[in-house]
Amino acid sequence: MKIKPPIPLALTLLSLLAIFANTANSQTRSSVGDVYEVESGTLIYREFHTFSSEPGNEFMQTQYKAPTGELLAERAVDFNNGYASAYVFKQLEPLTVKQVTRNDEGIEYKEVNGDKVKNHSFTVKNLNKAVVNAGMFNAVQRAWPQLINGEATLIDIVVPNRKRAFTMELKAVDVTTTNMAKYLATDSLIAFKLRLKSRLLRLIVPPIELGYNKNSKRLVFYHGPSNILKSNGKPYKKIRVLYTNSE
């Protein structure tokens, strides 16, 4: 397989942000998430998401800020017909930059951690339907009719640093049995669990919990891993996020 070299990271981030800026007159919506470390219960940062859409395309910009307002990281995502096609994430401290680009031939990935650089290209089964990072926002929307009827749906989620995709099962569960019930009134909410299809891997990788408003179909709760690193470079073991949505 022959794939063109990835575009320079800084240029790609600027390009995606420019695309977003040029869609200011299209339909937009926003979401703010308060992120807590599950282990300590401490508010560790906030997520500010802005979505801009036009026929066939959607763009997403995210800023991650400390409770004091200091910028920690930013992300830009370009969607094509509901699937994330380009993604750039940059954390300022420790310096971490990740770039993913999907084209008709495969996936290009570049990662920078301090002075260490990874750069590789690969392909996966069901390339056009596989979910890349923030594509999970749209994956639930696509499967909504099946999910609310109690049917499970399988999603291939790309893990670029592993150069492969993992098949995961998404299914509605009893909201009263989830962590969400501890923090939110659940009358108008529906809960989903996302877990690996492999029974063996399920033993070592806990499921992700997602909570949605039944009427708006907007994400209101997340319980799982974080894409932000601690200042010492180590990952947060588990976070919960409470979202407030607006148009």
Image (cartoon, grey):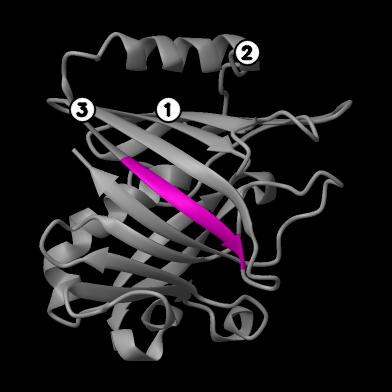
- 71 vs 198, left or right, is right
Q: Position of residue 65 (x, y in %)?
A: 58, 37
First in sequence: mark 2 or mark 1?
2
First in sequence: mark 3 or mark 1?
3
Residue 171 shown in magenta: no
Q: CA distance from mark 2 to mark 1?
A: 19 Å
Q: Please name the residue that numbered disc 1 is placed on.
A: 103
Q: Position of residue 198 (x, y in %)?
A: 53, 79
Whether residues under marks 3 and 1 lie with C-beta atoms below 8 angstroms apart, the answer is no
Amino acid type for the residue under numbered disc 2: Ala
Q: Which residues fall within the magenta stretch?
A: 31-37
**Badge number at residue 53:** 3
Q: Is residue 172 visible?
A: yes
| 195 up-or-down from 59: above or below | below
- 177 vs 81, left or right, is right
Q: Position of residue 34 (x, y in %)?
A: 48, 53
As helix, strand or loop, the secondary structure at mark 1 comes to loop
